[in-house]
Image (tube, rainbow, N blue to C red):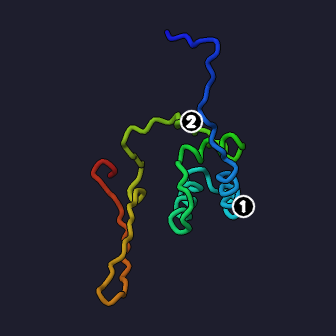
Amino acid sequence: MTHWSKDWQDRRRKPDDSEALARIHAVIGDLPTYGYHRVWAVLRRQSETDDMAVLNAKRVYRIMRQNVLLFERKPEIPPSKRAHTGKVAVGENNQRWCSDGFEFSYDNGEKMPVSFATGISTAANH
């Protein structure tokens, strides 16, 4: 383990985040529901178009965290206690149905919707 001398000082410069914070506030003022990742994306696009300094995503996250601008994380949804065994059973015929829908696009731009439904009947249900 390395020990520092008593006269050692941390000489790393602390970045001045005031300009970056003002840019973040400008984005959040227009779009208050954006998290750090979207804020960073907006700032990155602004940097490209306006010849501004590019901000690193980690720096945006740090500045937003230090200034309490991050959203709370969603609580994790507990897994269901019902076990799914992979078998769907019904007591009578005409109780299990399957449906789907999709769309074809023709070269001329017209669309043709297709949808179907079918009843499922197996010997086990008779």
Q: Which residue lies most toward the front here?
A: 7
- Residue displayed at 59% across by 12% down: 5
Viewer-side label of 1, 2: 1
Three-letter code, disc 1: Gly
Secondary structure under tag 1 reads: helix
Which residue is drawn at the image coordinates 54% and 62% (left, top)? Answer: 47
Which disc number belongs to residue 78?
2
**Residue at the location (52% across, 69% down)?**
49
Horizontal side of 105 relative to 47 (left or right) equals left
Choose top left, top right, bottom left or bottom right for residue 52.
bottom right
- CB under 8 Å between discs 1 and 2: no
Front one among 52 and 22: 52
Query: How far apart are the two marked residues, 1 and 2, measured between alpha carbons?
Result: 34 Å
Q: Amino acid at mark 2?
A: Pro
Q: Earlier in the sequence, mark 1 or mark 2?
A: 1
**Residue toward you, 102 or 93:** 102
Q: Position of residue 17 (x, y in %)?
A: 66, 47
Q: Which residue is mark 1?
A: 29
- Direction from residue 24 to residue 1 in the image, left or right: left
In the picture shown, does residue 3 fall above or below 62? above
Q: Is 9 above or below relative to 5? A: below
Which numbered tag is attached to residue 117?
none
Q: Position of residue 14 (x, y in %)?
A: 63, 37
Q: Nearer the viewer, residue 104 or 36?
A: 36
Label 2 environment density (alpha carbons within 10 Å; few <14, some 14–19, many ≥20):
few
**Secondary structure category for the residue under label 2:** loop
Q: Position of residue 65 (x, y in %)?
A: 66, 41
Along the viewing direction, whichever of 107 and 66 lies nearer the viewer:
66
Report the residue at 32% width, 90% height from top: 108
- Give neighbour class at mark 1: few <14, some 14-19, many 20+ (Cα, 10 Å): few
